[in-house]
Image (tube, rainbow, N blue to C red):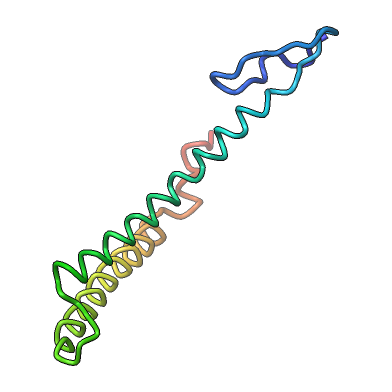
Amino acid sequence: MIDAPYDLAPGDVLILDKAGRMAASGFGVYTIGLILAGVPMGLVVLAIAQMGVHLVFFLHITTAPDNTNNVLALAFGVLIVFLVVVGSLWIMTDLNTNMMPPAEMMNMHNRP
């Protein structure tokens, strides 16, 4: 007998063996899941490679001695973007902490 026939993931098919028990889902389902889990990592690798191509071929960032100003400008730009993103996250976290009402006020509507 099936203990929990309702305990299935969406799109999962209930597979019964000859005795009426639930059987294993199958090797193919796990293989497809493993392949799909690697897609985001592949996209990250391709995005980093594309950034490198843009830096070298479009912005002409190379290791030549006359490229010092370009590298410093790029480093300064990365620093500014980093400061804006981290500062924004810091401010939002601080506001979330400080703007919450005290626990006593949150529970006032539950009192008789």
In this picture, is 112 found above or below 40?
above
Most extreme residue toward the right is 19
Q: Is residue 59 left or right of residue 97?
A: left
Q: Quadrant of the N terminus?
A: top right
Where's residue 94, x and y in %? 37, 64
Task: Give how far across and how far down residue 16 sits, in percent.
Answer: 75, 11
- Residue situated in front as seen by the camera: 89 or 59: 59
| Left or right position of 41 against 13 | left
Say which quarter of the image contains residue 88. Answer: bottom left
Tell whether 34 sits left or right of 99: right
Q: Is residue 73 above or below residue 81?
A: below
Q: How many marks?
A: 0
Residue 56 position, x and y percent, is 21, 71
The residue drawn where x is 45% and y is 48% is 105
- Work out whether residue 89 or residue 96 is closer to the camera in this orientation and state it: 89
Q: Residue at x 15, y 82 (%)?
A: 70
Residue at coordinates 20% horizontally, 64% vertically from top-left? 54
